[in-house]
Image (cartoon, rainbow, N blue to C red):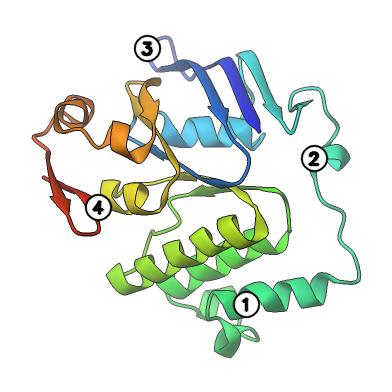
């Protein structure tokens, strides 16, 4: 489990994130949604120790990220690495690209390669900031299907920042909706897919249509 308790980050006197409190359960996909500048990436970066928190506490697998040493949080590579890397190369459809440099890849190919690199660390917790960037609709569907597979079959806990509400709701177990540096709402897909709630968070009219494959947000 990832536990966030009253975490705060101040960039300037006017730009402040938090206090943020969240309980992200083990296994499954939890998505952070919200308008630009809501604090989604800041929350992800603080959990990933890429950005120091000013106040509060964040625990990952019962370890306080501010006091735990890096070796306790990071995975030490083993001789099995090549097999692990090959597994995720195959999973993300990168076999024909595995001997090419990142600079030689298109934006979409590079995005898949970055996700494969993260998954290859074989950590229990996977943090992804906008994993669908630079991907067309078909590749976005494939990416989310792969992440759903990783969560379900390998028991990974995936926390991701998502720009697209419909992708977030289709593939997530739980959603945190953020606005103006705070968590405005959290819950299951059914709880978050509410027209009044989403309209308030995004400050634009959003209707919810209930189709055969679940709810769809229409702007």
Residue contact between numbered discs 3 and 4, judged by CB atoms under 8 Å:
no
Specify few, some or many for label 1: CA neighbours under 10 Å numbering under 14, 14-19, or 20 or more: many
Q: Which mark is residue 73?
A: 2
| Label 4 secondary element | strand
Q: Gap between marks 3 and 1, in whole Å?
A: 44 Å
Is the residue 161 above or below the residue 113 in the image? above
Where's residue 187, x and y in %?
39, 30
Q: Earlier in the sequence, mark 3 or mark 1?
A: 3
Q: Are marks 3 and 2 in contact (CB under 8 Å)?
A: no
| Residue position marked by numbered label 1 in the rendering | 89
Q: Nearer the viewer, mark 3 or mark 2?
A: 2
| Circle 4 residues within 10 Å: few <14, some 14–19, many ≥20 | few
Left/right placement of residue 82 relative to residue 85 reads: right
Image quarter (top left, top right, bottom left or bottom right) of the C terminus: top left
- Return the disc, 2 or 4, that comes first in the chain's sequence: 2
Instruction: Please report whichever mark, 1 or 2, sits nearer to the chain's N-terminal start.
Output: 2
User: Which residue is the extreme one toward the right?
Assistant: 79
Q: Seen in the image, is 34 located left or right of residue 20? A: left
Real-space Cα distance between discs 2 and 4? 37 Å
Q: Residues within 10 Å of mark 2 (few under 14, many from 20)?
A: some
Residue 173 visible: yes
Residue for badge 4: 214
The mark that comes first in sequence, 3 or 2, is 3
Distance from Cα at disc 3 to Cα at disc 4: 39 Å
Q: Position of residue 169 (x, y in %)?
A: 33, 47
Q: Which residue is mark 3?
A: 14
């Amino acid at each position: 489990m990832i536990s966030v308790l009253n975490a705060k980050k101040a960039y300037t006197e006017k730009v402040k994130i938090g206090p943020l409190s969240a309980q992200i359960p083990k296994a499954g996909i939890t998505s952070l949604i919200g308008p630009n500048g809501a604090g989604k990436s800041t929350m992800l970066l603080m959990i990933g120790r890429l950005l120091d928190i000013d106040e509060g506490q964040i625990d990952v697998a019962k370890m306080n990220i501010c006091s735990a040493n890096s070796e306790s949080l990071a995975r030490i590579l083993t001789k099995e690495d090549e097999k692990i890397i090959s597994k995720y190369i195959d999973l993300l459809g990168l076999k024909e690209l595995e001997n090419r440099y990142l600079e030689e890849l298109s934006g979409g190919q590079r995005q898949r390669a970055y996700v494969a690199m993260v998954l290859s660390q074989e950590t229990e917790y996977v943090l992804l900031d906008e994993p669908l960037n630079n991907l067309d609709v078909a590749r976005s569907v494939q990416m989310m299907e792969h992440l759903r597979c990783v969560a379900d079959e390998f028991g990974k806990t995936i926390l991701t920042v998502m720009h697209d509400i419909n992708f977030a709701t289709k593939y997530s177990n739980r959603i945190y909706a953020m606005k103006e540096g705070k968590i405005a709402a959290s819950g299951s897909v059914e709880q978050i897919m509410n027209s009044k709630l989403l309209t308030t968070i995004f400050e634009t009219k959003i209707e919810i249509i209930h189709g055969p494959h679940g709810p769809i947000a229409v702007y």
